Amino acid sequence: MSSIQKPPQRPRGTQDMIGEAAERFDHVVRTFDRVRRLHGYARVEVPVFESTAVFARGLGETTDVVSKEMYSFEDRGGDSLTLRPEFTAGICRAFVENGWQQLAPMKLATWGPLFRYERPQKGRFRQFHQLDAEVIGAGEPAADVEVIALGAQLLAELGVADRVVLQLNTLGDAETRGRWRDALVAHFSGHLDVLSPESRERLAKNPLRILDSKAESDRALVADAPRIDAYMTAEAGAFFERVMRGLEASGVAFERAPALVRGFDYYRHTAFEFVTQALGAQGTVIGGGRYDGLIGMMGGPETPAVGWAGGIERLALLAGLPAEVRMQVAVVAADAQGEEAALRLLAGLRSAGVSAEQGWKGNLKKKMERAGKAGVRLVLLVGSDELAAGEATLKDMGSGEQRRVALGEAVTAVRARLAGGGLWG
RNA sequence: GCGGUCGUAGCUCAAUUGGUUAGAGCGCCGGUUUGUGGUACCGGAGGUUGCGGGUUCAAUCCCCGUCGAUCGCCCCA
């Protein structure tokens, strides 16, 4: 007889969550869902996997995500598919495919799992989860302000705003970005001998990246590298100016981060990150920017857009535990005769909107013990004694007091007690 | 993909310079007589020391590999 030799193990970089971790995760998602409604973002659902080309073209062929981190596979029909490594490209694909430009401007929000084949670390997983917000079809700086304000309020509602700062930069328009890039390449190319190996690599792939190099040897070079402001077109400069003014008017604090550069090729103009010191190397909790060229590049109508993604695991690590959610009432049958009455009470409580659990395991003592551990405020007890009088016993687990109530009024009595704080009796 | 640290019960950790039945707290299960929880007392289950090799009379401890976690790099949320 053969048996499984080793119990299966969860794949590297994935997680099983229960208890506190699961509650924190859920708390982030629920807070996001509440706040995005306040801001008028509609829910959008897109597939977890797409044709590989959606991401390969959208993110830029040379980015790490595309060149070595995608979970790509061939399905049985021979098509190359990829588990989504980010949200934006898929949403844009949907926008183009379904002709959503008729609905523009659209404010969309979603959340769910993403996949990247990376070496796991604290706050970095192979299956991870993001919140996502996009404003599509709006080229006005007010849209940038709008979407950033959503992030700011989310952080405030999660109670982490004091540990997170908003770093803001602009990459300018296509012309600005191109000229600045050329200047940077020229600057760094003149000092190849000093440049760190990592940055020499970046020079070819994404020279802007060198600006936030952590290598000691790059520091001096970076310090006198050309700054974007010198290459900014008048239009791009004015745009950024209006974004900053808008944030100030919205009460969103930020700091200018001239070295902030985002990874994917599609970013233009505004780039921003909400960053914390509290999570080590993975300090970016929300990141995003404007990507005016992406939808046109995908074959759709030229459509400006801005958006961001937030790491749920990272936010959950920062945010405190939500207020404890506990069962309000436990219904307990004292003996076999009380079981049906207990089920009736349970159903009555639940349909009246009272969270209720039943004790079904063990003797009465055990059931009470479990009720105590569950932290319920009240216990409704029914057995043959109570039934003989058409009543149930209502017990307050805080004070230990108990009294009889008529079966027909038990639900009302429970609600009054829960709402009340009113005196017993 | 690169470098460092770590891996003992469900959880947090112990175990003298390698030495014989690997311990504790918490948690879990049961009990302290009859229909009542939280505190207290008693008892119990649970570990092939991540896995696989090697050195040794003897390995949780030393060596190698592997898997996983963790810190930094890279990248990014």
Image (cartoon, rainbow, N blue to C red):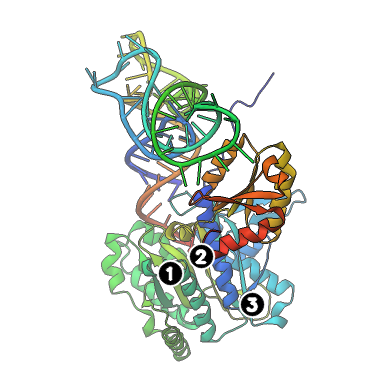
Q: Residue at x 62, y 61 (%)?
A: A415
Q: Amino acid at mark 1?
A: Phe
The answer for how far apart the CA atoms under marks 2 and 3 are is 25 Å
Q: Nearer the viewer, mark 2 or mark 3?
A: 2
Are the numbered discs 3 and 1 placed on the same chain, yes or no? yes
Q: Nearer the viewer, mark 3 or mark 1?
A: 1
Contact between labelled residues 2 and 1, with CB atoms less than 8 Å apart: yes
Q: Which of A393 and A269 lies nearest the eye of the viewer?
A: A393
Q: Which of A411 and A59 lies nearest the eye of the viewer?
A: A411
Label 1 environment density (alpha carbons within 10 Å; few <14, some 14–19, many ≥20)? many
Q: Amino acid at mark 2?
A: Gly
Which is nearer the N-term, disc 2 or disc 3? 3
Image location (x, y in percent) of residue A289? 50, 74
A249 sits to left or right of A23? left
Give the labeled residue for mark 1.
A274
The chain identifier of the residue carrying mark 3 reads A
Q: Residue at x 65, y 64 (%)?
A: A54
Image location (x, y in percent) of residue A187? 34, 73
The answer for how far apart the CA atoms under marks 1 and 2 are is 9 Å
Give the labeled residue for mark 3.
A296
A160 sits to left or right of A11? left
Give the labeled residue for mark 2.
A310
